[in-house]
Image: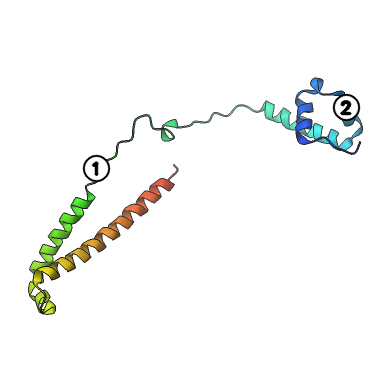
């Protein structure tokens, strides 16, 4: 016989030798290669069977929260708009003479709004990137 037993058949023979078909037993008597594999599996199963069970501590609460997750109301847009408004007022008060000289024909209010909004947008975008970076780091933290 030139065909050898596959892994599943050898494992079945090692675990349930008395329930295996006669042809499998006959093949193992004449095939040295399959007999060596059977002996290897017997050693492996003997070692695995003699091992003490290992206790594994699993924190299921991290996998499935027991209570519903409540989301906080996001007040950040209101804070950012208020901060941009205060920043525009402060910048307008400190630099009113300089901004009016540079602006020429534009009214001071339009210039203050443009400067304040651009600075506010830059601050919001920068802080948004920082918050997003921190959230990504928190998601990667597996400890």
Q: Is residue 73 above or below residue 126?
A: above
Q: Position of residue 139 (x, y in %)?
A: 41, 46
Which residue does the image show at 73% across and 28% down from the upper left? Answer: 46
| CA separation in Å, label 1 and label 2 | 72 Å
Which residue does the image show at 15% across and 55% down from the upper left? Answer: 82
Count of all numbered marks drawn on residues in the image = 2
Q: Is residue 19 above or below residue 112?
A: above
Q: Quadrant of residue 3?
A: top right
Q: According to the image, label 2 marks what residue? A: 23
Q: Earlier in the sequence, mark 1 or mark 2?
A: 2
Disc 2 packing (10 Å; few <14; some 14–19; many ≥20): few
Q: According to the image, label 1 marks what residue? A: 73
Q: Is residue 26 above or below residue 120?
A: above
Which residue does the image show at 37% across and 29% down from the upper left? Answer: 66
Which residue does the image show at 20% across and 55% down from the upper left? Answer: 80
Q: Position of residue 98 (x, y in %)?
A: 10, 76
Q: Secondary structure at mark 1?
A: loop
Tell me if 57 is positioned left or right of 100 in this view.
right
Residue 2: mark in rendering: none
């Amino acid at each position: 016989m030139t065909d050898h037993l596959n892994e599943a058949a050898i494992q079945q023979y090692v675990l349930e030798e008395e329930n295996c078909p006669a042809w499998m037993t006959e093949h193992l008597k004449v095939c040295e290669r399959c007999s060596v594999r059977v002996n290897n599996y017997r050693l492996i199963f003997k070692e695995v069977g003699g091992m003490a069970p290992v206790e594994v501590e699993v924190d299921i609460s991290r996998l499935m929260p027991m209570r519903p997750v409540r989301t906080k109301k996001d007040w950040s847009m209101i804070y950012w708009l208020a901060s941009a408004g205060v920043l525009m007022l402060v910048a307008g008060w400190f630099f009113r003479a300089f901004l009016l000289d540079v602006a020429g024909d534009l009214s001071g209010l339009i210039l203050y709004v443009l400067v304040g909004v651009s600075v506010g947008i830059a601050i919001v975008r920068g802080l948004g990137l920082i918050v997003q970076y921190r959230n990504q780091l928190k998601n990667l933290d597996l400890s």
